[in-house]
Amino acid sequence: MNISCWSKRIVRGVVLSAVLFASVAQAQWLSLHEDAALVTYTERGEILRTDIFVNVAEMLDYKQKMRNQQGLMFHSVVIRAQYNCRDNRVRTYTIDFHDERMAGGQIVKTEKVYSQWQPINPRSVEQNLKNYACDPK
C-alpha cells in the first residue's frame, strides 16, 4: 500500500471518529425545559453524586445571540453548580459563556462564582434539575 492510500485511510478514520465522538458528546445533553428564548439542558456525564451533594452542569442554549450588561456577546451558557439534595438548596461555582449554540465554539468568558447556598424555587427548572440529579437511579 502506498503512502497516499494510507494517508487517505487515516484521514477517513479521523473524520469518522470525530463524527462519532461529536454525536456521542451531543447525546449526553438532556433537555429539561424550552421556552421562546432558550432551551435548558443538563449534561448527564457531568452529574457527580456524593452522600447529600450532586454536582451538575446546566446549559442555557439561547435561540438568538445575547449581550450582557458589559457588552459580552454569547449564544450559550454552561453553569456548573452543586445541589444539596436534603435541604433543597443550590450554589453556583462556575459560569462559561460560549460564542456558539450548544456550548460550541470558543468560551468567551469564564466566571468563578462560588455563590452562597440559595433555596430552590419549587416550581422552577432548577427544581426539575435537582430532582433529576438527586434521584439515585
Image: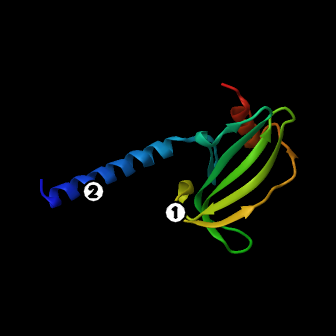
Relative side of 12 to 71, left or right:
left
66 up-or-down from 18: above or below: below
Q: Residue at x 78, y 32 (%)?
A: 51
Q: Where does the image place residue 59, in percent across and percent down from the top left? A: 63, 50
Label 2: which residue? 11
At x 49%, y 45%, the residue is 25
Instruction: Point out the residue furthest to the top here.
Output: 137
Amino acid residing under circle 2: Val
Q: Position of residue 20 (x, y in %)?
A: 39, 45
- Tally of numbered tags: 2
Residue at (87, 35) in percent of width and height? 87
Q: Earlier in the sequence, mark 1 or mark 2?
A: 2
Q: Name the residue under label 1.
A: 105
Residue 123 occupies which quadrant of the picture? top right
Report the disc number at residue 34.
none
Q: Position of residue 60 (x, y in %)?
A: 64, 52
Please rate how many residues cluster around mark 1, counting C-alpha atoms within 10 Å: few if below 14, some from 14 to 19, many from 20: few
SS for callout 1: loop
Along the line of sight, which residue is nearer the eye, 42 or 65? 42
